[in-house]
Image (cartoon, coloured by chain):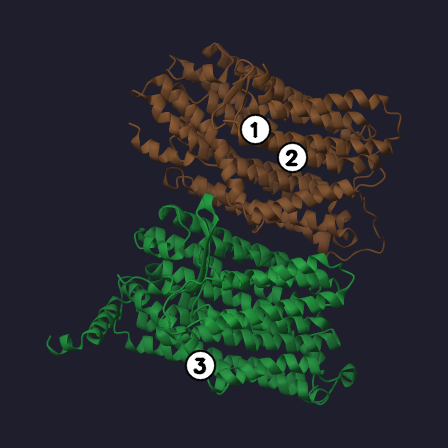
Amino acid sequence: MLHDLALVAPQLILLFAALFTLVVDPFLHTNTDARRFWGWFGAAFAALAIVAAALLWKFGPFEMQTPAFAHHISASRYSLFFVALVSLCSLVTHLASPRYLVEQGASYGEYYALVHFATFGMACMVAAESIITLFMALEIMSMSVYVLVAFKRGSVASVEAGMKYFIMGSVASALLLYGTAFVYGLAGSTNYIDIGRTLAKPIAGGDLWLGLAMMLVGAAFLFKVAAAPFHMWAPDAYEGAPTPITGLMASGVKVAGFAALLKFVYAGMAGPAMAAMHQHLPHILATVAVLSMTVGNLLALTQRSVKRTLAYSSVAHAGYILLGCVAYVADPTLAGYQQPSGAVPFYLVGYALASLAAFAALASVGKNGEELTGEGQLIGMGRRHPLAGAVLGLAMISLAGVPPTLGFFGKLQLVRDVLGVDGGKYLPHVVILVLNSVVSAYYYLRVTVYVYMRPEGRLPREYVRESSLDWAMGLTAAGLLVVGALPGRAMNLGLASVATIRTATATSHLAYERLAPGAQKTAAPLAVAPADAAAAQAKAP
Amino acid sequence: MMTQDWLQVASTSGFPLLTLLTLLPTAFAVMALLIPGDQPWAHKALGLCGSVAVLVVALATFGVVDTSLVGLQRVDDFSWISALNARWTLGIDGLSLPYVLLTAGLTPLVFIGAWSAIEVRWKEFTIAMLVLETGMLGSLLATDLLAFYVFWEVMLVPMYLIIGIWGGKDRIYATVKFFIYTMFGSLLMLVAILYLYHKGGGTFALHDLVAVTAKLSDKEQAWLFGAFALAFLIKVPVFPFHTWLPDAHTEAPTPGSVILAGVMLKLGTYGLLRFAVPLFPSAMGRFSWVLVTLAVIGIVFGAMMAYVQTDVKRLVAYSSVSHLGFVVLGITIFNEEALQGAILQGVNHGISTGALFILVGYLYERRHTREISEFGGIAKRMPVYAAFFVFVTMSSIALPLTNGFVGEFLIFAGAFKEGIQSKILFNATGMSWRMVVLIGTGIATLGIVLGAVYMLSMVRRVFFGEITKPENLRLHDLTLRERLIVGILCVFMVWIGVKPAGWLKLSETTVHAMVAPIRPQILQVRAPADYDREMKAALRAAHPMAAVTP
């Protein structure tokens, strides 16, 4: 039991922070201004969760999945990587929030508790080992975010956004539940490993039901990550939500969605019974990816509010990441024999940091209950608030994928890995991605044009200043530049994290199918060093 | 097939001199970041100190490079991104050395010139300029394709800001156009780089990839060459990809125009020479006629467009299109004379056009207009300025004893030699390379005449005649600082014009070593009969006895 608890230490830290905030806050007889300290408190606990994840990574034998609580949740390098990433999103959100909330007249303690709950949900989602955990974690995250979106009680736009997001999100949750029900019906278990074992043998007539299940689950996840054609909620929700929460939605929710999706597909749905479907999956993913990036970019061009622009840009980025997923699922047996690709985790780091930076910078413009995030309202920002202007500009450059920022290297690795699939089979998709980047550069640049280049009017604008907000912007900007200049280490971390689920899947399959005598032995080295995977693959029959 | 020795490592170094040279400007940019923005004098001083320090390091590099050696020298090779097998590989040879010196030399002059041209936001300007210098030097030194690409793109953002923040009235349109155009070209090049990377078994190293490309099919080579060439031709820019240039040049502040014309355009031709042609020589052979045609159209079209401009700066911008057509022509011909001419002409254009932009900037600072019709007779009020301007004009239109003459002469000498010696009438595609070269070069010669026409007519309208506008009566002549900047550039114009031998020697060995393996591969495709003839001649030269007894 204690061992199990240790494995989920980061999640427990987040949960404790949430409960502590919730319980203690009502007893604080202070004014709203003083509640800003919850921002620092939350950031500290998020940092603690990151440290815990890092320690587990360093000292635990997590090259393999280490299940806890009867295979309902696990710790692995994969989950730890993403737990650390969503905690980082939470950290920046906490730092960016306090002054913004005071200005918007919504400085309540529940806000911080809800951010913690949402992060807790995300952290459990990426570590889920069974359908039940996945669904519960997803709901904890979603419910918290629904409330947070509508948190500006006085603002009609905010409440409307929360309502829309809630209703459409509930449909998505229902789809997920329905889809996983089929899986349960076929496999007789909610556990990823058991599902994987059952699906290792072909099931008579199973293609139809599995296909239906994947379609429903896929739609639910596409909704959560705001990929076209399930992106309709994004612009309204992004625009109406409090700006730091928009940052959390763009970064944390998306990260958790993609991480959980990949893990579900890998760990649960990778068996040979799925072979027929997996032949089509890369094409389907690639098509949705192209659709999503094109739709997102074209619609972003027409927006005039930066928050809406970034909402559509997040649809486009969901498309890029989906194309990156092709590099994972293009191997029809999905047994992890291919050279693993660390593109998606690494891309998510870059995208999350850039989004957080952008929304933190935008959080500094709101004043007295107004958002002021229209493009025209950013004029002069570069001079009046140099830090926010520079960070916003840097975030745009990174989102556009221009070197030497992190966004470039994310896109680079993604394109590299997708091009490597089947000898350049996805070259047309990659070219479309690149052309999309050019289109997107136009609207990202437009933001910098307003920040730096348009002639300023006579009225000087005041900006919100707060040390925690400066920290939020400084941290994310430093991340974009420093990791951008030396991306090697982060890339290796991403690779190592993905290698765990790949090798775990490969091991269980090899062991189960008894492809060769001593299959366990063959598989064991895979787990230790991902680089050896290719060599081991060559030896495998 | 001969190996491309000129891309091999000739010498490594214990001290990472080239890394220092590349990152030093950024180090100064970081310092500028730490100084508050309300102290412009500090940033002016820092920018100058930084760029002079870079110049000193560049001269030290020049001191330790042995131009008689084949191959890349003082190579710094570190692991950079192990997950992608991308390396930090910087090396210098006779091809990059002239441009490194040009870049390092122009930047301090630009900083001094900017003291009056840039009035606000000195902090941002200093940072942008220094980061830009890192991008330019890195692009010139990197031989790892990914490192090169990163530096190539690093140039983009600072220049975007320089045009967009300190530029003229239509600066936003111009700078966004510049950014999007360039990014479009370079992203397609990135896809091509990654395609090559996979074909080469996961390496970005240029000398490894050169061996890989020969094994690709003709179709693949053509597409990849197209992607590389497009990126570079947009940057040069060659007709019909030039439309961003007049806007960007005209709207950019003087320092931006000088760097843009002086160095960044040259990086397009440098990229062709360093990457596109060595990687895909046979595709180059197939498309030589396209490049010659585009270059010649650019020469004539640029000159004609320059002639009808009413804005002096726009005129100079179009003259760049025309002048760089000569450079592309020389590169396409790809024999030793033409290449030497093309490399030197790149440097010449940087000096002469840079000087022209600086001079136009002086006028703009005084009158806040650049319309030719606003001037007339100002030689009477500004004799020194007029003298400098006329001198730089002479250099720009390639008067003998100025630098422009040497470069253009060599290009034409190489081109006519190629055309006259070419024996073939029609090659496999029904194209006569001899006719393409002779007709093309013939028309290009016309471009020189046109160059004289548009420049001299502009000079006449601006400087001579009666003073018609009362504002021009109050113009004051150049200050000492202004004279110093242009004076330094003029010294180099004369120096290269009168004694070009030393300058040509910088790149002589490299060009020789580059032509030897690449030219046969180009010729094989574009003029097979010439290929046979040159191969026999090379054999005779290598084995004199064999020639006597056939």
* Chain B drawn colour: green
On the rendered image, what quadrant is the C terminus of chain B found in?
bottom left
Q: Amino acid at mark 3?
A: Gly
- Determine the chain carrying the residue at label 2: A
Mark 3 vs mark 1: give the one in front.
1
Residue at the spot x=56%, y=23% of the render? A127
Q: Nearer the viewer, residue B322 or B162?
A: B162
| Proximity of marks 1 and 2: CB atoms separated by less than 8 Å | no
Q: Which residue is mark 3?
A: B502
Residue A197 occupies which quadrant of the picture? Answer: top left
Residue B252 sits above or below residue A83 on the image = below
Mark 3, Cα crowd under 10 Å, few <14 / some 14-19 / many 20+, is few
Answer with left or right where residue B25 lies relative to residue B91: right
On the rendered image, what quadrant is the N terminus of chain B found in?
bottom left
- At which x and y percent is residue B161? 66, 58
Q: Which residue is mark 2?
A: A88
